Amino acid sequence: MPGPAPLSRRGLGLAAAAAGLAIGFRLDAPARAAEGEVTPMLLANPRLDTWVRLAPDGRITVRTGRVELGQGVLTAMRQIAAEELDLDPAAIEVLSADTDAAPNEGFTAGSMSVRYGGEALGVACADLRASLLRVAAEAWGTEPSRLTVADATIQDADGRRMTYGEAAGRVSVARPVDTSVRRKDPALGRLVGTSLPRTDLPAKVFGQQVFIHDLRPEGMLFGAVARPPGYAARLLSFDEAAARALPGVVAVVRDGSFLGVVARREEQAREAARRIAEAAAWENGDPLFGGKGVFDHMKGIDAEEKVLHRTAGDAQGSVRAHRVEYRRGYQAHASIGASCALAQWEGGRLTVWSHTQGPFPLRTDLAKALRVEEASIRVVHAQGSGCYGHNGADDVALDAALLARAAGGRPVRVHWTHEEEMAWEPWSSAMIVRMEAGLGFDGTPTSWTHDVRSFSHNTRPGQPGAQGCNLRSAWMLERPVGPPVSTDAPLPAGAAARNAVPIYAGIPNQRVSTHFLKEAPIRTSALRTLGGYFNALCGDLFIDELAALAGKDPVSYRLANLRDPRLAAVLHRAVELAGWTPEAVRLSPALEPVMTGTGIGLTRYKNTDCYVAVVARAEVDTRSGAVRPIALWAAVDAGRVVNPDGLRNQIEGGMVQSTSWTLLEEGRWDANRIVSDSYADYPILAFPSLPRIESAIIDRPDQAPLGAGEGSQAPTGAALANAVFAATGRRVPEIPLTPGRVRAALLA
Amino acid sequence: MAKLTVNGRGVEVDVDPATPLIYVLRNDLALNGPKLGCGRAQCGACTVHLDGEAIRSCQFPVGEAEGRRVTTLEGLGTPERPHPLQEAFLAEQAAQCGYCTSGMIMQGAALIQARPGITEAEVLAGMEGNLCRCGTQPRVVRAVLSAARKGA
């Protein structure tokens, strides 16, 4: 098993990860930096002026390739830069991703922004500060180490002062970053570790222009796609003259089976697309899953089998085995604002405004689909509604580019409908996990196996070296560019098998394997945590069952098999916060009308990032099968924290989101496509079902910051499922825990 | 042609009266507050006030707003003169992506207006039609209750 990617030594002192999803950068894997080496973001973007610039008047602009997804990353970056440069955070301008003007940091994903991108930005800012100090030291004939900075003014002990503006003219940023520069001692920090309010919120609270949906350039037209009836459908014919005659229509675009419209008004474009799609003649493909259920289908098709992790150990003899199969259906991102893009062609050059997580990878795939040079495309990031992973953000950018080609140089905005987002975005794969453990005479586990059967959790655009294009409409063109062969990511981060390696280092004879399914009838990709939510949840469900078989309570049983004190610490803290006295779960007791239970979930996200324990209390109405979440308590250790309130917002938000996934969410399909395309058909948690939520942070200022944007989903889901187990003494093996499934498990 | 009063200003727009109000507010009047969400009155992102009451502008024909007062987030308060609930949202940092925020504030402001001594249970029930996917609901509840206590 490959080791986790270590941070550079400098990273330990730095940054602090706040609230963030961070970036899943492809360079992370090959450039697994050894201790003291340069962070991969600086290897990819070595020039100082890519990261930070200094105007003649001393104004400082920092550039990050990370994008704001609502996780507060631009606030955290501002804190890091201001800390390093000894500036008021408000004095810095922060520019986010733009393929013409910002570093290429791949994707903002995977809870890696602060850990990797913050590290790079911090080094660059420390380098700039050192250069400015050298200018003053030379002017005054002294040593930089004798100088201090306050509020953008350099001073020495004799009272001499020089502002950054005065020094600016003698500093060049058109050079490589000096990666040997010393970062500020964390003990001297005054910004990192504080809850600086989010810098983007005032504009959102007062209705100022923030979102891509708010961009209204002069002459803008509106585009919409006329959707086929199914994923495998082909367009046979349509009445182009009738389409052009619809109200407001300016242009109709057909390219193979891609069909769309440009209109003067947004509602006209949407209505025209709907009518065109309805009137067109389409030929549907074969029924999804051959008409079977998804789990049967998954077990019946060819799978790529791999063993990813194995340990030996002195197993004592096992006297019994425990085997389970857990399943989870398809789940959606279900963003409140559907995906949106704005595109404009000017003399063969295309500019796309997009809320993509990866402007550079999007550009790569746009160039493939449109058959133009990458250099002729600029992708500028503009904020969207929260995406929670790979939703329709990238796909809609190609739709806008295809439609804008027919708009005579005018900008075209495409804002999918919610139905379109739900039916056509990539979903999170259905999953089947099989687990088996041997148990000794006293109930101690003697082995642990975890097998994951899943479609892909990452079909993002711009896969390095891949043939093909991961933008949906490219597959439908007259000269289609099909999707690349789907692949799974290796551990430790993993994709389908993320968090499949147990956190219980005390259990011997571990084996983790995958059955990876390459052909996905329903397109799948990254939803926050990828496979991590379900794999970690399964581990938690399974250990609770082992504890119950051993007649032990779930907390002491976990502790007996843990070897990492930080996991034990969050476990203790969450139990204490909940005021819970754990007891052994009694299996299959007589049912009462309403039963209440308390359960636990414990994870280290990706086995390399933050530690989170969640305790849940839930009530089960055994007559209806309805589960009511009463309260959730979490404890988190994310190492050194950049912004405590940002961290809390991510952790608690993840708890609400996961409550929704775990109790409610499941996509359904007909022969042709996903049909759960409204909030009525795919409900998400609403205010009246909100459990009480409390969280505690274990701050470790002496430890490296750890990614935390996705840390609470798995332990929350597990805690809820284990609360149902504790309440009823019966396991519901399938997520979500809908009343029907709960009833079936109670009656089994 | 439809004549409306939006945020205290009389406006005329040349559209089919059946056009959902949200498109007029966002695209003709360039207002950013109301957001186009599900388009089916299931998520609440498009919430605005009509004569002080919260409505879903994605399902409301502009023609029916003729002669009535429409208020959007921009009209509720400004950075210089914020509504107490806008201040409370900032104090509680009650957002992540912020896409649902306008609808949350408009719905919450109408609730507080209608029931000054509103309880937590009433907030939960009153906000049922407003969805947040980032999971900031606990902060939203705290913001609404705190603004209500301050007599918003």
Image: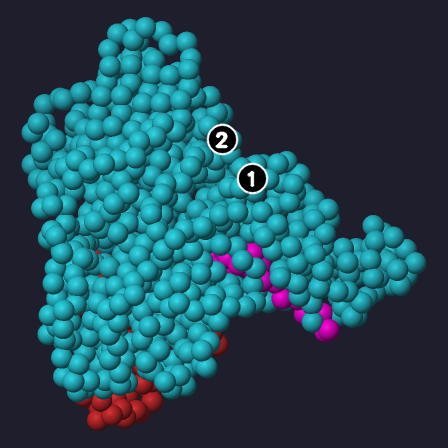
Is the residue under label 1 in contact with that under label 2 (CB below 8 Å)? yes
Give the x, y percent position of residue A223: 29, 76
Query: How many badges with numbers are in the image?
Result: 2
Q: Chain of mark 2?
A: A
Q: Chain of mark 1?
A: A
Give the x, y percent position of residue A626: 14, 41
Task: Tell me the element at label 1.
Answer: loop
Residue at far front of view? A479
Residue sitting at 31 percent across and 69 percent down?
A399
Q: Earlier in the sequence, mark 2 or mark 1?
A: 2
Residue beneath label 1, please? A32
Start-end of magenta stretch: A56-80
Find chain A in the image and tell me its colour.
Answer: cyan
The quarter holding residue A335 reads bottom left
Give the x, y percent position of residue A282: 12, 66
- Name the one closer to the observer, A521 or A311: A521
Residue sitting at 27 percent across and 91 percent down?
B13
Distance (Cα) linking label 2 and label 1 = 10 Å
Give yes or no for residue A48 being in the magenta stretch.
no
Give the x, y percent position of residue A605: 42, 37
Q: Residues within 10 Å of mark 2 (few under 14, many from 20)?
A: few
Which amino acid does the dot numbered 2 rest on? Pro
In this rendering, is residue A646 above or below A421?
A: above
Which chain is rendered red in the image? B
- Name the one closer to the observer, A143 or A154: A143
Residue beneath label 2, please? A2
Q: In this view of the protein, can residue A101 be seen by the observer? A: yes
In the rendered structure, the answer to whether residue A731 lies left or right of residue A560 reads: left
Residue sitting at 41 percent across and 86 percent down?
A218
Task: Tell me the element at label 2.
Answer: loop
In the rendered structure, the answer to whether residue A502 lies left or right of residue A671 reads: right
Split into 4 quadrants, where in the image is the C terminus of chain A?
Answer: top left
